[in-house]
Image: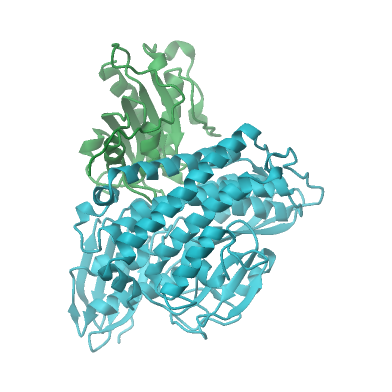
């Protein structure tokens, strides 16, 4: 069956991207997870810390009662060279919904808890989505729908502008099955490293 | 047979586990189905202001936050003994109808579609939405995405956020909609009706027109004669947002209907020592074990149940499909569980029609969307139909409205006993006299599980063919014969 020019309707109000100009890549950083499910909240916490350190506005909503969201003093924050091209959001979505959220961006960094069982809790790994070792990063795997790689292929096949550079910063979690706003200590200790991993990753990538 | 203790203390994390025990002849005697569950939610809510709970319940699991929010909103209204104005109820139901269209669409094309459209024997690599699109055409993929966008847009307009609404407060909503929004919502709803009709036509052509699929659907493997429940309005037509819960026996005779606050007279929970999850059953019939029949209190809550438990659909196009469903399948009630996928599409059409009905009601844009509560909070129950089953929220508070206790019966919990029975039947079909047909066993078991559209721990993180699952088979002495695993 041939596909004749089906238009993928953009969710973004305006899209400033144009292939005629050498403009900055639009990057979205998304903390994934359930803020009520113990270690599953780490994605949101890390994303919030990244947002504060880079002095970025949030287009999502996150409010935590814990101390780890206290902003750093101004002089300790790294200057942000491209503030207008990076956005931060917080989601409890996966699969198709997550793909739909990525539409319009050139690059994405997804921060999530992972339950590979292979590493000790608190281990931080950074990889590109296509290198993902298995489907155990929960929200990338699915939330009652398809997994993200499949969803991305679907979106692209319909002409959606989706990022080709998708990085995952994953932290091995211990407890993601009990409702609590607390992190396992070994996971809590890994948060600064995870935050730094995101910032290092951003610095290493071309604008 | 020797007694084997299955220790539920070992928390299952990440995958479902099925233990199959054979009798001395090598046939299936019992199956035990354990899944990892999310725990402690009830405890987590204690001490919080009860108005906060519908926002927290959004996050019980990622599958139907809208349903939990609605059940929670209704429970909070009941706690405060306040009746929201008609406009508020309509707005909530409108949001809910749009959500249903999104959810049922996603389920059919992404989860059921691969099982059906590709066939259960299709290679795992093809049994996903891409395989479906490849078979039915790319344009359809675009329509699925469009349906989701429209549904999410309506939820956001009325609920304040996509997917996780937050505008319900005791007595109504924090905001209404403008005429401009109403027009947009109506337009999207009319598109949804066309899309639902298109999907039903697709199903007719691809599935009902194919003898192999039809045989599978009508076959006995996934058939159980249990009770069926579903919420209906005063005319006994299905309503997802409000009404009374109708209970109908396996013979089609209605046992009765109950209002939200009466649920404890009807539903009790049975405990088994080998699993933390309890098994709800009908109190008036009693727990007789994992068996079918009029004397067994096991019941089912799914789209199929809702069709069985009602006398019809409240909207004209869906009513035509309802009648066709039962006349094709030989009358009411229908027991073949795979027909749930068809029932779901009839509900999709109803939800779209209801969307337009509500969006064109003159009072939908009224500024009267809240009644301020005046009574002291005590206790209340809210029931809605989640896409995957009747959802009950029961909250208790002190006189300040601080939560002291909550009890939830979520959609899939209603079906825990039927799911276990379906799995056993699937296993019995493939294990005879000690011969295990390993090829396809995991798949058949997963299909049994999946047709209930479950929202349990491991199932929320997997897609067809990739649900993390471990099946162990033991002989009559408890010795391990075989372990089958996928994705764990």
Residue B294 or B176: which is nearer the viewer? Answer: B176
**Quadrant in the rendering for residue B396:** bottom right
Q: Position of residue B392 (x, y in %)?
A: 59, 61
Residue name at image x 52 percent, y 73 percent: B228
Residue B447 or A141: which is nearer the viewer? Answer: B447
Q: Position of residue A161 (x, y in %)?
A: 32, 29
Q: Quadrant of the C terminus of chain B?
A: bottom left
- Position above or below: B108 against A135: below
* Residue A56 left/right relative to B237: left
Asked if one can make out residue A111 in the rendered structure from this viewpoint, the answer is: yes
Q: Position of residue B276 (x, y in %)?
A: 45, 66
Q: Which chain is green?
A: A
Asked if one can make out residue B50 in the rendered structure from this viewpoint, the answer is: no
Determine the residue located farthest toward the right in the rendered image: B374
- Position above or below: A130 against B479: above
**Quadrant in the rendering for residue B282:** bottom right
Q: Position of residue B134 (x, y in %)?
A: 24, 48
Residue name at image x 51 percent, y 48 percent: B99
Residue B109 or B2: which is nearer the viewer? Answer: B109
- Position above or below: B94 against A162: below
Q: Which chain is cyan?
A: B
């Amino acid at each position: 069956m041939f596909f004749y020019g089906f238009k993928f309707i953009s969710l973004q109000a305006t899209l400033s991207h144009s292939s005629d100009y050498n403009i900055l890549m639009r990057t979205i950083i998304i903390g994934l997870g359930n803020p009520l499910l113990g270690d599953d909240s780490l994605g949101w916490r890390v994303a919030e810390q990244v947002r504060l350190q880079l002095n970025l506005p949030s287009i999502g909503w996150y409010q935590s009662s814990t101390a780890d969201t206290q902003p750093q003093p101004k002089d300790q924050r790294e200057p942000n060279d491209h503030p207008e091209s990076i956005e931060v959001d917080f989601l409890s979505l996966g699969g198709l919904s997550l793909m739909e959220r990525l539409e319009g961006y050139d690059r994405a960094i997804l921060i999530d808890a992972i339950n590979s069982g292979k590493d000790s809790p608190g281990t931080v790994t950074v990889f590109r989505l296509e290198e993902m070792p298995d489907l155990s990063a929960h929200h990338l795997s699915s939330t009652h729908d398809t997994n993200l790689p499949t969803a991305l292929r679907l979106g692209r096949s319909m002409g959606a502008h989706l990022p080709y550079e998708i990085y995952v910063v994953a932290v091995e979690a211990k407890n993601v099955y009990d409702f609590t706003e607390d992190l396992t200590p070994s996971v809590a200790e890994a948060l600064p490293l995870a935050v730094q991993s995101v910032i290092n990753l951003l610095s290493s990538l071309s604008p | 047979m020797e007694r084997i203790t299955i220790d539920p203390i070992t928390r299952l994390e990440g995958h479902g586990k099925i233990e199959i025990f054979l009798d001395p002849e090598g046939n299936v005697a019992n199956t035990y189905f354990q899944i990892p569950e999310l725990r402690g939610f009830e405890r987590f809510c204690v001490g919080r202001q009860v108005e906060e709970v519908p926002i927290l319940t959004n996050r019980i699991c990622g599958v139907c936050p809208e349903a939990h929010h609605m059940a929670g909103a209704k429970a909070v209204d009941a706690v405060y003994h306040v009746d929201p104005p008609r406009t508020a109820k309509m707005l909530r139901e409108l949001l809910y109808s749009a959500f249903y269209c999104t959810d049922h669409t996603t389920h059919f094309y992404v989860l059921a579609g691969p099982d059906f459209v590709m066939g259960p024997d299709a290679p795992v690599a093809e049994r996903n939405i891409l395989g479906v699109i490849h078979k039915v055409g790319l344009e359809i993929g675009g329509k699925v995405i469009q349906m989701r966008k429209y549904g999410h847009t309506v939820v956001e307009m009325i609920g304040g956020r996509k997917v996780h609404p937050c505008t319900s407060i005791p007595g109504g909503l924090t905001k209404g909609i403008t005429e401009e929004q109403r027009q947009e919502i109506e337009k999207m709803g009319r598109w949804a009706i066309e899309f639902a009709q298109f999907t039903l036509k697709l199903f007719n052509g691809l599935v009902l027109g194919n003898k192999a699929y039809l045989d599978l659907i009508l076959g006995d493997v996934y058939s159980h004669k249990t009770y069926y429940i579903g919420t209906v309005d005063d005319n006994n037509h299905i309503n997802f947002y409000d009404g009374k819960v109708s209970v109908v026996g396996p013979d089609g005779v209605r046992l009765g209907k109950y209002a939200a606050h009466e649920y404890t007279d009807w539903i009790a929970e049975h405990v088994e020592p080998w699993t933390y999850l309890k098994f709800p059953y009908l109190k008036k019939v009693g727990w007789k074990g994992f068996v079918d029949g009029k004397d067994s209190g096991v019941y089912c809550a799914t789209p199929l149940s809702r069709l069985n438990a009602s006398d019809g659909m409240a909207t004209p196009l869906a009513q035509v499909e309802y009648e066709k469903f039962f006349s094709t399948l030989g009358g009411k009630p229908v027991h073949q569980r795979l027909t749930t996928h068809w029932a779901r599409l009839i509900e999709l059409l109803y939800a779209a029609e209801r969307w337009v009905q509500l969006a064109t009601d003159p009072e939908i844009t009224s500024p009267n969307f809240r009644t301020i509560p005046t009574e002291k909070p005590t206790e209340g129950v809210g029931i809605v139909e989640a896409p995957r089953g009747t959802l009950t929220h029961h909250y208790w508070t002190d006189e300040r409205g601080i939560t002291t206790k909550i009890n939830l019966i979520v959609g899939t919990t209603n079906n825990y006993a039927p799911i276990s029975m379906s799995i056993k039947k699937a296993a019995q079909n493939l294990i005879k006299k000690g011969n295990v047909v390993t090829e396809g066993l995991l798949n058949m078991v997963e299909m049994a599980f999946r047709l209930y559209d479950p929202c349990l721990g491991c199932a929320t993180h997997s897609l067809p063919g990739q649900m993390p699952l471990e099946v162990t088979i033991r002989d009559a002495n408890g010795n391990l014969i075989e372990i089958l695993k996928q994705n764990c």
